[in-house]
Image (cartoon, helix red, strand yellow):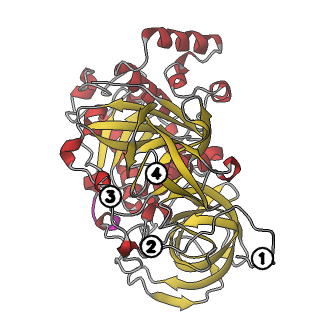
């Protein structure tokens, strides 16, 4: 497709014609389509108050209208040269179809890195055997909740940390089951890069691709690209189950590669790694099994992670810190939250604006990787303790802002969307759930303004009656409640949207206009 549909992000990776020593372990648990092989990759590259009667005076501060971004000047402490850090942080989402071995892979990796002690591992093995799930021992290093262990599936986004030679890695193990895709969205929206885990065994790979229905391999691939992730490692897992067959690996690579290119991934940005998490083959060190060595001479998984390009950080814009979870701890206090700094920076003692409530608060404490720190910049995953505000106004899906440059708050938006694989046409009046950063809100489609020509990006038909699979369109939506939002052209992380209906993602897109504002 031509780049005309959206020119708000210069991202050539959306062109479908191109072929495509350990310091500390920390942990946080965050409550975070069918065949689409011909979906034209629009996202990123192309998709871009209520009047009150007189009431008693409220203590809630009046939210000022956002000042022009051109007026903002970052403070010196926010700016950082490359030599100020030994390792750069990279947020790495691990996604894939249920039972592909994501959690086992993560657990194996952490154990091999020395982040899980022999005593802990022995405990996991014993508990797994007692439950009749002996093969789940490594996965239990990630799935710490009793429900997750009982069901044998990841339900929330588990967060762990480790260091490579080049990076400080924040590992986000996302749910694979279709029932928990909303949690996957909430967690993986923080990702800089991703590991897509696929099961190479006969039948399992095909199930993930949705040969006999909707496979989460495809939905997760579409979503992770829609989050803005350009660099992908495909971990072809359970190769021991197919005798490390080169033919099977090439089959997986060929079939999945076609689909990944249709999502907008470039071949040059995809790394394919055959491995076995359970057998610890090709994870930490170069392949050792003779059957794999006979045809594969590429990097192991850890080396592939180190080969990812460093993520770009937006420190030149005002603070934007979406709230992933509201938490409480001894060190942070009862008024605390966690999230990823998407723009700007934050430091202890500073004043911040808590949206959408408009409360002014003071930053009391900041923790990164469970350790106290004085400041954090764009790209950092942190936990923050606040003081001086109403605790009930601190909510998941809110955004922490610079006091002089508040985020927009709105309930009516214009979007450019790409319709995914659907069985029923989308009509005006459709009720759906809209996801934007960590916010989830019920919404309805109020107007289909135009269809977009996928070659030119220009309107090809005004006010169409309905939308079908693979169509791009400009639409207007009304939300049941206000959300914190930015136009995609201003801040991508707060301008991406996902529309879900009846348990499936039906469209993905970007915010092009904010139509009303609190």
Helix, strand or loop at label 1? It is loop
Q: In this picture, is 201 found above or below 138?
A: below
Helix, strand or loop at label 4? It is loop
Residue 139 in view: yes
Residue to which mark 3 is pinned: 75
Q: Residues within 10 Å of mark 2 (few under 14, many from 20)?
A: many
Q: Nearer the viewer, residue 143 or 362?
A: 362
Determine which of the numbered discs, if any, sits on residue 48 in the image.
Answer: 2
Q: From which residue to which does the magenta span run?
A: 14-19
Residue to which mark 1 is pinned: 52
Residue to which mark 4 is pinned: 350
Q: Position of residue 167 (x, y in %)?
A: 28, 38
Please tell me which residue is depicted at 56% across the width and 15% down the height of the picture: 134
Of the two numbered discs 3 and 2 on the same chain, state the one appearing first in sequence: 2
Disc 1/disc 3 C-alpha distance (Å): 38 Å
Q: In this picture, is 478 found above or below 451?
A: above
Do the numbered discs 2 and 1 sit on residues whose CB atoms are within 8 Å? no
Residue 423 in view: no
Q: Residues within 10 Å of mark 4 (few under 14, many from 20)?
A: few
């Amino acid at each position: 497709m031509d780049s005309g549909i959206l020119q708000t992000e210069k991202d050539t990776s959306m062109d479908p014609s191109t072929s495509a020593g350990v310091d500390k372990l920390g942990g946080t648990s965050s409550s975070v389509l069918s065949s689409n092989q011909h979906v034209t990759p629009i996202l990123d590259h192309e998709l871009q108050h209520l009047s009150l009667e007189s009431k008693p005076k409220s203590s809630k501060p009046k939210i000022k209208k956002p000042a022009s971004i051109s007026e903002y000047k970052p403070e010196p402490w926010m700016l950082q040269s490359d030599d100020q850090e030994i390792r750069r942080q990279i947020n790495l989402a691990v996604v894939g179809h249920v039972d592909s071995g994501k959690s086992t892979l993560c657990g194996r990796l952490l154990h091999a890195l020395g982040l899980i002690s022999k005593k802990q591992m022995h405990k996991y093995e014993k508990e797994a055997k007692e439950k009749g799930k002996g093969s789940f021992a490594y996965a239990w290093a990630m799935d710490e909740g009793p429900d997750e262990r009982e069901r044998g599936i990841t339900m929330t986004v588990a967060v762990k940390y480790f260091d490579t030679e080049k990076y400080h890695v924040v590992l986000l193990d996302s749910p694979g089951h279709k029932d928990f895709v909303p949690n996957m969205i909430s967690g993986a929206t923080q990702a800089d890069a991703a590991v897509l885990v696929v099961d190479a065994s006969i039948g399992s790979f095909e199930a993930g691709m949705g040969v006999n229905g909707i496979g989460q391999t495809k939905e997760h691939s579409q979503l992770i690209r829609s989050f803005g992730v350009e660099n992908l490692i495909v971990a072809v897992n359970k190769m021991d189950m197919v005798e490390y067959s080169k033919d099977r690996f090439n089959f997986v690579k060929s079939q999945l590669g076609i689909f990944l290119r249709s999502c907008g991934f470039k071949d040059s940005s995809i790394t394919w790694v055959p491995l076995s998490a359970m057998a610890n083959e090709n994870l930490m060190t170069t392949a050792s099994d003779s059957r794999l060595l006979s045809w594969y001479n590429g990097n192991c998984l850890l080396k592939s992670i180190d080969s990812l390009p460093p993520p770009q950080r937006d420190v030149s814009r005002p603070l934007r810190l979406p709230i992933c979870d509201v938490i409480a701890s001894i060190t942070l206090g009862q008024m605390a939250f966690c999230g990823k700094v998407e723009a700007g920076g934050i430091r202890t003692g500073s004043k911040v604006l808590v949206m959408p409530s408009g409360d002014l608060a003071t930053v009391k404490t900041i923790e990164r990787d469970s350790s106290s720190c004085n400041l954090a910049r764009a790209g950092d995953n942190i936990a923050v303790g606040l003081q001086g505000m109403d605790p009930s106004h601190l909510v998941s899906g809110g955004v922490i802002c610079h006091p002089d440059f508040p985020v927009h708050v709105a309930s009516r938006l214009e979007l450019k969307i790409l319709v995914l694989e659907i069985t029923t046409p989308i009509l005006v009046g459709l009720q759906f759930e809209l996801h934007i950063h960590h916010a989830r809100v019920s919404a309805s489609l109020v107007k289909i303004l135009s269809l977009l020509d996928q070659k030119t990006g220009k309107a090809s038909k005004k006010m169409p009656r309905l939308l079908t699979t693979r169509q791009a369109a400009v639409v207007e939506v009304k939300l049941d409640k206000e959300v914190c939002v930015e136009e995609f052209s201003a801040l991508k992380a707060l301008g991406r949207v996902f529309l879900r209906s009846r348990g499936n993602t039906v469209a993905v897109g970007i915010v092009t206009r904010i139509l009303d504002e609190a």
